[in-house]
Image (tube, rainbow, N blue to C red):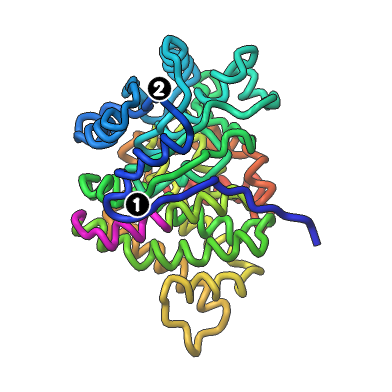
């Protein structure tokens, strides 16, 4: 048996209206100068107004950088870092989806480690000391970045997303306020929610799965499978939004103690070269990769089926595993997730480049419960082209 560990955030405050707790939390940190890192979509939706007002009412000086793009590149992150260096900051608040929170974590450690560069981090250089304290307020229920020691950066010259992983990236505090997610459009609710479901299922089936990840992943699967359709069809459903936020954070905890697998490995070149939204690429790939992974792992899939609320009484383990796959296909259909790669103009001519790109993501492929070679990767992509 291998050793395993649980890496988690210092404090989580959850529930409708919990963003008001910013006042007490910044006092606990002793922070007087806060930098909010976010994006234009969040700012345009008015979601920065309340957190900023709460902070300012507490006597805190607030600066805002709201130019985090989706799927940020190395150069874009460096631009945000350069802007952040202009401010005296003793707490960074990341408000947004995965990209904003990932950038907030990177900026925090680079501010505290001025001799370290982003390129060095991407080359797996160690981080000598923790960064500026960080507090995350997710406005989507997807990446789980608020609970992971990971940050993802797009490296255009390699046409791949690269993950930076370090315990020093783990946020200090998280606020899960479902009111911050009610303006999320259905399409983004679907794609980010499916991303969270991918995290939970992949971490449960990963070779690195352990009692910690199994506990959180099964609960995450149950929460997301039971609430994603409701959150998608009625964004004002606070209970569904709350369950989605919890499920996404639990999925992030799973990543911190286990790992994602082949779904994410095959998704990386789709995002890196074709700029497919991360949640969409994961959702499209998920049922095909799970059908591949079910062979020899049927017992695990029976547990997934139960967590999803599927009726499997009287089914063989193989039939229960296939029920999971069919349920994932049905979920994609219900959430209007695209069924193929056509809208991104990906054709047979792109196939070998995708295969080569995915095969390089050994950090994740090595965790897959069933060995996946280039022929296997090619077969899965062919279903989508």
Identify the residue shown where x is 35% and y is 44%: 21
Q: Quadrant of the C terminus?
A: top left
Q: Which residues are magenta?
A: 235-246
**In the image as oriented, which residue stretches furthest toward the right?**
1
Crowd around label 1: few <14 · some 14–19 · many ≥20 (10 Å): some
Tell me the element at label 2: strand
The answer to which of 62 and 201 lies nearer the viewer is 62
Q: Quadrant of the N terminus?
A: bottom right
Q: Position of residue 11 (x, y in %)?
A: 50, 48
**Residue identified by numbered label 1:** 339
Q: Position of residue 77 (x, y in %)?
A: 46, 20
Tell me the element at label 1: loop
Secondary structure mostly taken by the magenta-highlighted segment of the chain:
helix
Identify the residue shown where x is 30% and y is 38%: 343
Relative to 90, residue 187 above or below = below
Q: CA distance from mark 1 to mark 2?
A: 47 Å
**Residue identified by numbered label 2:** 33
Mark closer to the observer (1, 2): 2
Relative to 141, residue 84 above or below = above
Can residue 340 be seen in the rendering of this structure?
yes
The answer to which of 316 and 177 lies nearer the viewer is 177
Task: Describe residue 247's horizontal placement relative to residue 50 as left or right.
Answer: right
Residue 66 is inside the magenta segment: no
Give me the disc on residue 262: none
Q: Position of residue 227 (x, y in %)?
A: 32, 64
Question: Which quadrant of the structure image shows residue 115?
Answer: top right
Residue 241 is inside the magenta segment: yes
Identify the residue shown where x is 31% and y is 27%: 59
């Amino acid at each position: 048996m291998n050793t395993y560990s649980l890496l988690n955030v210092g404090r989580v405050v959850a529930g409708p209206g919990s963003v008001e707790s910013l006042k007490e939390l910044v006092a606990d940190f002793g922070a007087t100068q806060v930098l909010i890192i976010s994006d234009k979509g969040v700012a345009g939706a008015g979601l920065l107004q309340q957190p900023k007002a709460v902070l300012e009412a507490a006597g805190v000086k607030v600066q805002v950088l709201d130019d985090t793009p989706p799927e940020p590149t190395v150069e874009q992150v460096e631009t945000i870092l350069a802007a952040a260096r202009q401010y005296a900051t003793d707490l960074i608040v990341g408000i947004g989806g995965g990209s904003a929170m990932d950038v907030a974590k990177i900026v925090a450690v680079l501010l505290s480690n001025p001799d370290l560069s982003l390129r060095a981090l991407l080359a797996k250089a160690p981080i000598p000391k923790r960064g500026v304290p960080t507090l995350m307020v997710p406005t989507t229920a997807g990446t789980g970045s608020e609970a992971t020691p990971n940050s993802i950066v797009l490296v255009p010259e390699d046409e791949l997303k690269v993950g930076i992983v370090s315990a020093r990236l783990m946020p200090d505090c998280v606020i899960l306020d479902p009111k911050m997610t009610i303006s999320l459009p259905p399409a983004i609710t679907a794609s980010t929610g499916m991303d969270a479901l991918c995290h939970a299922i992949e971490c449960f089936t990963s070779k690195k799965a352990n009692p910690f990840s199994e506990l959180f992943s099964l609960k995450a699967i149950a929460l997301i499978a039971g609430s994603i359709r409701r959150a998608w069809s009625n964004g004002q459903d606070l209970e569904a939004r709350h369950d989605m936020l919890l499920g996404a954070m639990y999925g992030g905890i799973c990543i911190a103690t286990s790992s994602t697998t082949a779904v994410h490995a095959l998704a990386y070149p789709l995002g890196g070269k074709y700029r497919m939204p991360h949640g969409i690429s994961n959702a499209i790939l998920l049922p095909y990769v799970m059908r591949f992974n079910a062979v020899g792992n049927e017992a695990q899939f029976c547990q997934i089926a139960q967590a999803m609320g599927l009726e499997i009484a009287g089914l063989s383990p193989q039939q229960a595993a296939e029920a999971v796959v069919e349920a994932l296909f049905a979920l994609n259909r219900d959430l209007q997730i695209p069924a193929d790669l056509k809208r991104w103009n990906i054709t047979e001519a792109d196939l070998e480049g995708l295969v080569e790109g995915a095969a390089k993501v050994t950090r994740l492929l090595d965790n897959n419960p069933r060995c996946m070679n280039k022929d296997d990767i090619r077969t899965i992509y062919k279903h989508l082209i």
